[in-house]
Amino acid sequence: MLRIKGLTKRYRTGDLALKNIDLDVPDGQVMALIGPSGAGKSTVIRCINRLVEPTSGTITLNDTEIVGLRSGDLRRMRRRMGMIFQEYALVERLSVMENVLSGRLGYVGFWQSFMRKFPQSDIDEAFRLLQRVGLDHMADKRADELSGGQRQRVGICRALIQNPELLLVDEPTASLDPKTSRQIMRLIKELCAERKLSAIINIHDVMLAQMFAERIVGLKLGEIVYDGPPDKLTPAVLTQIYGEEDWASTIRKADDDAEPVDELAPARPAETPVIERDRLAGLT
Amino acid sequence: MSLTVPAIPSRPWKKPPLIKRAWLRWTLILGFALYLAAAFGTTNVNWARVWEGMPRGMQFVTAFFPPDFTSRWDEIVDGIAESLWMTVVATVVGIALSVPVGIGAARNIAPLPVYYFCRSILAVSRSFQEVILAIFFVKLFGFGPFAGFVTLAFATIGFYGKLLAEDIEDMDASQAEAVRATGAGWLQWINYGVQPQVMPRMIGLGLYRLDINFRESAVVGIVGGGGIGATLNTSFDRYEFDTAAAIILIIIAIVMLTEYSSGYLRRWVQ
Amino acid sequence: MMSKTLASPKRSWQRRDRKTQLTVWAGYLIGTAIFVFCFQKISETTIWAFVWDAPAQAADLGSRMVPPAWSYIHQLWRPIWDTINIATMGTLISIVLAVPIAYCAARNTTPSVTFLRPVALFIIVASRSINSLIWALMLVTIVGPGVFAGIIAIGLRSIGFVAKLLYEAIEEIDESQVEAVRATGASAAQTTAYGIVPQVMPAFAGISVFRWDINIRESTVLGLVGAGGIGLELNAAITQLYWTQVSLMLLVIIATVILSEWVSAKVRHAII
């Protein structure tokens, strides 16, 4: 269980990115964080694993206080949280396998990692994860030879091999096409369910957020303005988060996405959401 | 997709080597190791002499604290001034001459015989270190800054001409073609189709070469080409390390200054 | 309507407006004045008779240089070997020393912006502004003539070059990849090894080979001040006026330089 209390972040430039955020994420919950760019979504995620230093407030993950940890303890803390990045952030000149294994860096010593001598159990786990996302035949390919969707799957493996208690996901679909975006989101959701992981997913695509998250938190100018289930996300709420716009075509009906998709199946046209204009017309 | 993944047999993983072919990899590694061994083996270092020189080395280091600017000040000023004249004239003349050579050495606009002729000029100019050229030009023109100027100008042709040629070869052919299609003459074509494409980068490179020429002007003096190098050489010959230290500091300062200001100018011009 | 169109005043077109045009002309004028002044200064110290005589001198020298003394090549193998060793070992030394300096000079990796970074930058500038021949000149007086002085001179000169290009490469890396490695709980050393090293490795290898290629050319002249290599023989032949030997050595230098350029281009191509 992740508990954030009174989190505030002021950047050195003076910008107040987060204003007194309170947020609890219970175990096994997949939560989407939405909001316009500059709302502080990335800052929230980066404060949790302290890639960004919070100005004040407390963050506890399963009873361990994160803010104020010293470097050694901080590293042990970081390996309990897997992070998945926008634009994948794979080390492009390393192979797929090295990228996945880099998720174990918090567990092995420097020379061991430098000589690429990881324990066999780590290697087994890496192969298992790669097979799970359908990339085990690519293990020795260099990361920059992969397509966007494949790269993001490697990024997911890198996060999962840490054996984390929490996934921090930063705009996982920002540079992917609509179909791959869905596959990646579905994969993240399935993996979270398999491992009883909780996840915080920053995402700007409201429709994807509604489709795959159990809970949605809306952030605006560093403050939480919405916290609730996806189907309560009305145009009025969206207007509050993002500002005035025609939201009819953005909002998805609750039961729209029923069938699971096998992402390894041959390509099929990306589904277009069915919109009940009549129903929504009254709301806008 | 099923959520249970069948257990896969444990298999080892090793980082694949950079060079896939084992024999090639080992040949390269062994060859390099052998070369290094041979190189170390055949390099005779007279350690006694090196040891003996250490106090002198210390003397040289201490000469920097403080360096002696005053006792040879006039010579230093003359040397620096001469280096500056040489640098300016050599850069201007060198660039002026390298434009036709560079155009001639661009495969996409020059006829083959011209191309080979210009390319060989560039090859000669680039192969020889400035100092070797300076020795010959000193023989031909006599001691003094004129030989230094000719040396630097010739070296500039090699540097600037080659980059100009490469830039012209890399240019967008369709733009040049469009100008040709209007019925422009050859010179008009160069002026309208080629020049605008290569000009911004070449201005930057010209300023960069001004930098290099000043730095090089310090060495052509060692073989008699005039400038600050001559002053420096004399001070070494007289074992006046504190004067040498002063000259070196001045060179560093001027190089920093030119580098900074040429960087600024480049941004302003582009 | 028609007449109105015809009556519109003729518009003239100029590439630049009046003020810019004047500035440009003034720029040209000042430039020319500087050039003429500098040339004047040089010509004051020039004996023009020598200059006018130069073409005849050149023809004379040329005729004395042919044919090259081919048999002399057997005495050149050793100096050539020394020259290549000076370049290679000097480059190796500079690489070893340049890496920590570049690490300290790059804004995103330096341990201390206020102290170490300026020191590293000064080392880079100092090393770059002093030509290897001047380094050699100093080192010959300190450690004595010979290959050793040459190696150190090349090494010292190359530190600045390698470190400058390397620290620029480090500053250009993709920070998000580094951040991703850090987020796994990696230590600082591991973050460097996994996040930074792979990103700058190609640039580093390219820079090293490129500098080696330049160093081959530089080491051909170090002998002129006594620091070993083929320059030593060249200097001796020139002072003794053995012009046929000189021409052979020039050919050898061209061949070596072209060969090294080819090797370096090949290696860089293979890396990238």
Image (cartoon, rainbow, N blue to C red):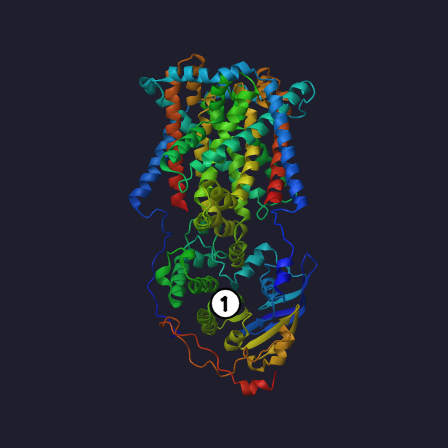
Compared with A42, C82 (above or below) is above
Locate residue A196 relative to residue B108 in the image: left or right: right
Can residue C204 be seen in this snapshot?
no
The spot of residue A228 in percent (x, y) is 60, 79
Residue with the mark numbered 1 = A173
Q: Residue at x 52, y 24 (%)?
A: B150
How many marks overall? 1
View extreme (front): residue: C3
Compared with A156, C79 (above or below) is above
Report the quarter where the N terminus of chain C lies: bottom right
Locate residue A201 relative to residue C16 in the image: left or right: left
Q: Viewer-proximal residue, A40 or B204?
A: B204
Q: Viewer-proximal residue, A119 or B78?
A: B78
The spot of residue B23 in percent (x, y) is 29, 43
Locate residue A174 relative to residue A139 in the image: left or right: right
Q: Viewer-proximal residue, C193 or A43?
A: A43
Can residue B158 be seen in this snapshot?
yes
Question: Crowding at label 1, few (<14), some or many (≥20) Cα neighbours within 10 Å?
Answer: many
- Residue C213, quarter of the rendered image: top left
- Identify the amino acid type marked 1: Thr
The spot of residue B93 in percent (x, y) is 54, 29
Element class at badge 1: loop
Badge 1 sits on which subunit?
A: A
The spot of residue B142 in percent (x, y) is 52, 16
Q: Viewer-proximal residue, B183 or C33?
A: B183
View extreme (left): residue: B23
Compared with C1, A144 (above or below) is above
